[in-house]
Amino acid sequence: MIEGEIEEDIEYRPLGPRLDRNASGLRIDSFLARNFPFHTRNQWQKRLESGEVRIETHSVGPSYRLRQGDQISYYRPEQAEPDINTNVHAIARWGGIMAIYKPSNIPMHEGGRYHKNTFFDVVCDTFGKEWSAVHRLDRDTSGIVMCGATPELREKLSAELRKRTLKKHYLAIAIGNSKLDRWSEHGPIGMTSETIFREKRWVTEDGLPSHTEFEVLDSTEGFCLLHASPKTGRTHQIRIHSSFAGLPLVGDPKYHPNEHVFLKYLDTGYDEYVLEHTVAPRMCLHAAFVEFTNPETNKLTAVESPLPDDMAWIWGRLSSGERCIPNLPPYVC
C-alpha cells in the first residue's frame, strides 16, 4: 500500500462526480465551500483535518490542490436514521439550473442523526450526482431550493446571493396578532449569553446587520399568515425577527419566548407541553418565491411555490378556531 493511503472504507461515499479540468489547481477547502455550501469553508477545513474527506482513498489537508479526474469522497457511515419526507421534486428547470421543492422534515445535509436521509442525497439519487444546492433551508422549512448542475452555474447563482440580487420571499404562520399590517425588523443578529442555553442566536447590540420586511396577509384570532422578505441572509433570520416582534412561528420551539419549551422539545419532541406552546408539530415557514437573473438565459426569472398542503391544512384548522393541532394530515409522512 502506498504511504499515506488508507484502506478502502465503505463509509466514505463520493461527493459528486470526478472533477473536470475547471477544478484543477483550486484548493480543496475553497472548492468544497463554494460547491457544497452545506458547510462553511472553516467547517470543511476541520473535516479535512480530521480525515473525513479524501481524494480517492487518500486523506488530504485543506491546502491540497485539486487535479482533473480527482474523486472526492466524504465520511458518511451507514446507520439507522429518522424517517424523512422524500417528496422532493422539480418545480422548474432551465438547462443546468433547477428549482427543486424541498418538503418539511428533511435536512439539507448530513449532521447529527442524519447521514443519508438528506436533501443532498435525495437530489443526487433523483436527478444525478452533478446537481447540488446553492443555498440552504432549515430542516423543517419547506419550499424552493435553487440547484445547479455545474460549478460555474452554481458560482453564478451564489454570486447573486452574495450581491442580494437573488430575491427570496417566504410565507409563515405566526402565533399572535400584529398591530401593524406592514413593518420592518432591523435588529442585528448574533450570539447572546442572555439565555439558559450555552449559546443562542438572537437580536443583540453587537450582532450583524439584519433586515426583514413583514406583511400580514391574513389573520384569525391569535394567529396570522405572514409574508416575509429577508434583505440580509443571517441564519434563522425570519424565525428570530418574527419572534422578536412578538410573533413566534407556529411549530418552532427553538425561538419560542419561553426557552423551557425548547429544552422540553430536545428531550421529548412535540409532546403535550411543547404543543401547548407551539400549536402544531411542523414549523410553519415556507420559501415561496425566488427571483434571479438566469445565467442560462441572462433574463430576470421568477419561480413560485404556493403554500404547501400541510401548512394550508394547519391554517384552515386555526381559522376554524382550533388552538392545538397534535397531528399533521395523514398524507404527510
Image (cartoon, helix red, strand yellow):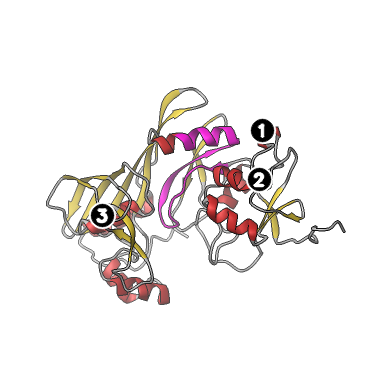
Circle 2 SS class: loop
Which class describes the residues within 10 Å of circle 1: few (<14), some (14-19), or many (20+)? few
Q: Is residue 266 above or below residue 48?
A: below
Figure quadrant of the N terminus: bottom right
Dot 1 or dot 2, earlier in sequence = 2
Amino acid at dot 3: Ser
The residues tagged by marks 1 and 2 sit, at their Cα atoms, a distance apart of 14 Å
Amino acid at dot 2: Gly
Residue placed under numbered mark 2 in the picture: 16
Image mark for residue 242: 3
Q: Position of residue 23 (x, y in %)?
A: 66, 37
Q: Position of residue 323 (x, y in %)?
A: 23, 66
Dot 1 or dot 3, earlier in sequence = 1
**Image quadrant where residue 21 sits:** top right
Q: Position of residue 168 (x, y in %)?
A: 36, 40
Taking the spot 26% from the left edge, 54% from the top edge, the residue there is: 242
Query: In the figure, is residue 6 to the left or right of 97?
Result: right
Query: In the figure, is residue 102 to the left or right of 316?
Result: right
Specify the segment rendered in magenta. 132-159
Residue placed under numbered mark 1 in the picture: 22
Which class describes the residues within 10 Å of circle 2: few (<14), some (14-19), or many (20+)? some
* Marks 1, 2: nearer the viewer: 1
